[in-house]
Amino acid sequence: MKARQLITLLEKSHYPFRNYPKESCTTLLFPGCSFPSQFPKTMDALAELCREHGVGVAYDCCGKPVAELKGERDTVRIAQKMTERLKRLGVGEVVCLCPNCLEYLGETLDFPVISIYALLSRWDYTCQSPPPSGVVFRPCPDRETGRLLEEISKLVPLADLQTMERVPCCGLRGDIAAHGPAAADKLCAQAKEEGEGKTIYTYCASCSGQFRRHGCGQVRHLLSSLLGVEEEPDAAHALVNRARRKFEK
């Protein structure tokens, strides 16, 4: 196992920045690791919106990075402990920001798992920014069905966005990352070429941070646009950003 993968396994298998609500809640927002890391301003705005609607917010790792690195025993333990916490809080449904969390927890938990966009639609929320223009990158979990992008399109006008077609992954997926940085470098170089002169929109914070680290130009998250927050991925301070959520009340 490479050093970077070992560091990831050590952090995610016993996530040190875990922070669950102290009070019970029926609906729980689960931002995952990456979104609070890359988009702290948007996360603050969303957390405030959730407080206004009586939705709890839990900061934790879903366990997918551990599963991809073959930490079978840890994977089972993480799922069991998360289930126990959710039951203690009286949670009836889990809301995910991350496409990977959405897919993984939907398969792992015995709770209804929906996207943040489905929740915002339920609230009749309206987009707070002008329509985005540029290219949109579809993350791995949504490439086959496009279901999540369809949910977003009901909230954000996407007519001025072209789909990035030639890049199948940002390079962070476990089976690709296992080949080392060269594979990710090649994929991000393709993304940079296809998005040259345009803003690259994503709806996966991990992809956003990856493109930012590889100098792919202007990168934005569709959720930031939806909430009216002007923010680039803060890849340089990702660890600090997610660590501070440990102490959020």
Image (cartoon, grey):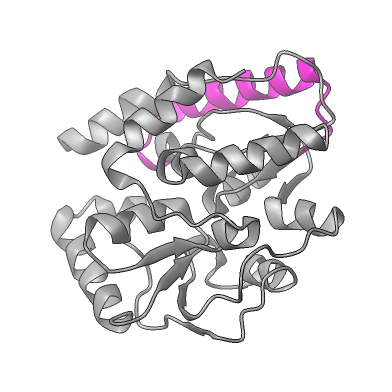
The x, y position of residue 77, in whole percent, is: 54, 20
Residue 172 seen in render: no
From the image, which quarter does the C terminus lie in? top right
Identity of the residue drawn at 50% across and 25% down: 245
From the image, which quarter does the N terminus lie in? top left
Identity of the residue drawn at 60% across and 27% down: 79
Residue 12 figure quarter: top left
The x, y position of residue 22, in whole percent, is: 71, 13
Direction from residue 102 to residue 200 in the image, left or right: left
Residue 27 figure quarter: top right
Question: Camera-side residue: 154 or 49?
Answer: 49
Residues shaded magenta: 68-93
Question: Camera-side residue: 190 or 13?
Answer: 190
The x, y position of residue 16, in whole percent, is: 42, 18
Direction from residue 16 to residue 45 in the image, left or right: right
Identity of the residue drawn at 53% across and 38% down: 32
